Image: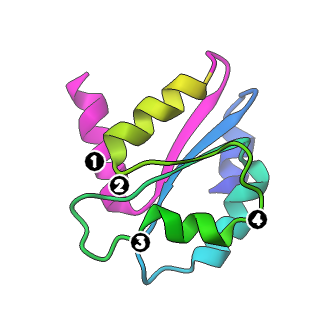
Amino acid sequence: LAESIKRIFSYKKLILVLGVSKDKDIKGILDELLPISDSIVLTKSKVLARALEPGRIWERIREKKGMFLTTGAEEAIIKAREIANLEDLILITGSLFLVGEARAIYVKE
């Protein structure tokens, strides 16, 4: 994903919206996505029982500058839009459940 984002998209800053399940390789995900991210909005799926609390992801990241905690997809999208400029890219990833919730929000708009 990180390689494809850099290759396919042109952007000034990348705002990462991330929510993952408890049983996923959090370290591996962070190792790949943190280096390409300028800001990080941590959240979780509201429909997935095994969604990891955003605070637990926060604890694994050393750099806290440009990081935000939210409680769900809608709040995360609002926060990402607040910090993004027109030339920035918002990447919503991690749990497919989170991506599905975000997609539903965008489709409604």
Q: Which residue is painted at 77% across and 57% down in the image?
A: 63
The residue most toward the bottom is 23
- The earlier-in-sequence mark between 3 and 1 is 3
Q: Position of residue 109 (x, y in %)?
A: 26, 21
31 within the magenta span: no
Which amino acid, by three-letter code, is at mark 3? Leu
Which residue was labeled with disc 2? 98
Q: Position of residue 1 (x, y in %)?
A: 62, 56
Q: Which residue is painted at 69% across and 42% down in the image?
A: 66
User: In the visual, does 2 lie left or right of 77?
Assistant: right
Magenta part of the protein: which range?
Answer: 85-109
Distance in Å between CA atoms under marks 2 and 1 = 5 Å
Which amino acid, by three-letter code, is at mark 4? Arg
Which residue was labeled with disc 4? 62
Distance in Å between CA atoms under marks 3 and 2 = 11 Å
Which amino acid, by three-letter code, is at mark 2? Leu
Which amino acid, by three-letter code, is at mark 1? Glu
Residue 52: which disc?
A: 3
90 within the magenta span: yes
Q: Position of residue 97 (x, y in %)?
A: 30, 59
Closer to viewer: mark 4 or mark 1: 4
- The earlier-in-sequence mark between 4 and 2 is 4
Q: Could you tell me which secondary element the residue under label 3 belongs to?
A: loop
Distance in Å between CA atoms under marks 4 and 1 = 28 Å
Closer to viewer: mark 3 or mark 1: 3
User: In the visual, does 89 lie left or right of 36?
Assistant: left
Q: Which residue is painted at 74% across and 46% down in the image?
A: 65
Q: Could you tell me which secondary element the residue under label 4 belongs to?
A: loop
